[in-house]
Image (cartoon, rainbow, N blue to C red):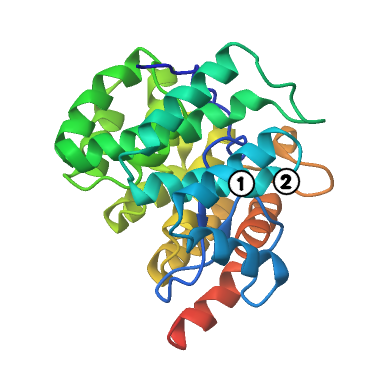
């Protein structure tokens, strides 16, 4: 059964709720969370994340999804449970994916306040794709995915799994990014590249951030390159991000006041977004990572 929702990550802002980019307790990379403001190890939020991402019982994880969908538990906990279910690749989860899709499509559950139950669909898709990845291998999943990008026949679950692929996935997409003259397609490629942790992307993402216009990209979309560097999260990627910010400021890339957000200019807002997602300023992370983190 294949059920996809349209991909909606063409803006330069953070991804919407669905399949979550989150990282904790990786000694070589920054903390990162799209769900929490300044997630830090040792906090109650971090302890909750650690429990869910370390859970091995698929029954307990599906219960978290059910509780979130029924308004009996935390919505973020339900989304994180889908992340973990995808990682576990339990074959029995496929039946649950099919059952949950049916409930959502048939609108069998009233949504909890201020939520959209369709936001669960990308997570369910990721569970299915990780099962396929386990059976068929990374190359087969990549070969199926690449042609669907131009057709916009994918969702956040596909993007999340793409970011985890080996098989030269990032290199393949980077080549397509550089070869196409279609701006909308190039934006799609860049957005997908921002899901990858492949350190080989660091030079390209830094160049895009310094001068998105030289790649026929709207200047505002440079924020997606910054997202990618922050998600890679190594000391080298943060050094590249800081150098790219300095070069962009000297070049005047983001000087247009229409790119400002609230009371911050574009580059100031970009810095604040890194703090929000990683819990520290990029310069602070350089000190932490230098000391062994």
Task: Report the residue marked by disc 2.
Answer: 73
Q: Nearer the viewer, residue 27 or 200?
A: 27
Q: Nearer the viewer, residue 265 or 6?
A: 6
Quick one: label 2 or label 1, which is nearer the N terminus?
1
Q: Nearer the viewer, residue 271 or 142?
A: 142
- Vertical arrangement, residue 76 with respect to residue 189, above or below: below
Which residue lies at the image location 22% right of the left edge and 43% below the top edge? 134
Which residue lies at the image location 34% right of the left edge and 21% below the top edge? 149
Q: How far is mark 2 from mark 1, CA to CA?
A: 7 Å
- Vertical arrangement, residue 55 with respect to residue 267, above or below: below
Whether residue 252 can be seen here: no
**Residue 82 horizontal/vertical position (percent):** 50, 43
Q: As drawn, is 98 to the left or to the right of 280?
A: left
Q: Nearer the viewer, residue 225 or 2?
A: 2
> Among all residues in the image, which is located at the extreme bottom?
291
Quarter of image, res 234: bottom left
**SS type, badge 2:** loop
Q: As drawn, is 129 to the left or to the right of 160?
A: left
**Residue 261 horizontal/vertical position (percent):** 76, 41
**Residue 227 horizontal/vertical position (percent):** 52, 48
Q: Decide: marks 2, 1 in contact (CB < 8 A)?
A: yes
Q: Which mark, residue 64? A: 1
Which residue lies at the image location 50% right of the left edge and 18% below the top edge? 5
Q: Residues within 10 Å of mark 1 (few under 14, many from 20)?
A: many
């Amino acid at each position: 059964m294949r059920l996809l929702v349209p991909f909606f990550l063409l803006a330069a802002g953070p991804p919407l709720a669905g399949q979550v980019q989150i990282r904790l307790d990786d000694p070589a990379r920054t903390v990162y969370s799209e769900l929490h403001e300044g997630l830090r190890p040792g906090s109650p939020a971090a302890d909750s994340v650690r429990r869910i991402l370390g859970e091995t019982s698929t029954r307990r994880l599906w219960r978290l999804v059910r509780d979130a969908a029924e308004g009996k538990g935390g919505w973020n906990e339900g989304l994180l449970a889908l992340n973990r279910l995808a990682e576990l690749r339990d074959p029995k989860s496929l039946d649950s994916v099919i059952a949950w899709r049916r409930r959502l499509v048939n609108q069998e559950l009233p949504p909890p306040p201020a939520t959209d139950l369709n936001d669960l669909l990308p997570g369910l898709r990721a569970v299915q794709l990780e099962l396929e990845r386990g059976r068929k291998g990374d190359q087969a999943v990549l070969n199926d995915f690449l042609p669907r990008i131009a057709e916009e026949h994918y969702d956040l679950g596909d993007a999340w799994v793409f970011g985890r692929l080996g098989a030269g996935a990032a290199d393949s997409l980077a080549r397509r990014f550089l070869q196409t003259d279609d701006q909308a397609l190039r934006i799609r490629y860049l957005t997908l590249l921002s899901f990858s942790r492949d350190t080989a992307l660091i030079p390209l993402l830094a160049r895009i951030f310094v001068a998105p216009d030289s790649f026929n990209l709207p200047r505002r979309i440079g924020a997606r390159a910054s997202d990618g560097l922050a998600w890679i999260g190594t000391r080298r990627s943060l050094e590249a991000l800081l150098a790219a910010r300095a070069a962009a400021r000297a070049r005047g890339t983001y000087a247009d006041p229409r790119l400002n957000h609230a009371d911050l200019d574009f580059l100031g807002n970009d810095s604040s977004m890194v703090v929000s997602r990683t819990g520290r300023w990029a310069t602070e992370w350089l000190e932490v990572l230098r000391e062994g983190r």
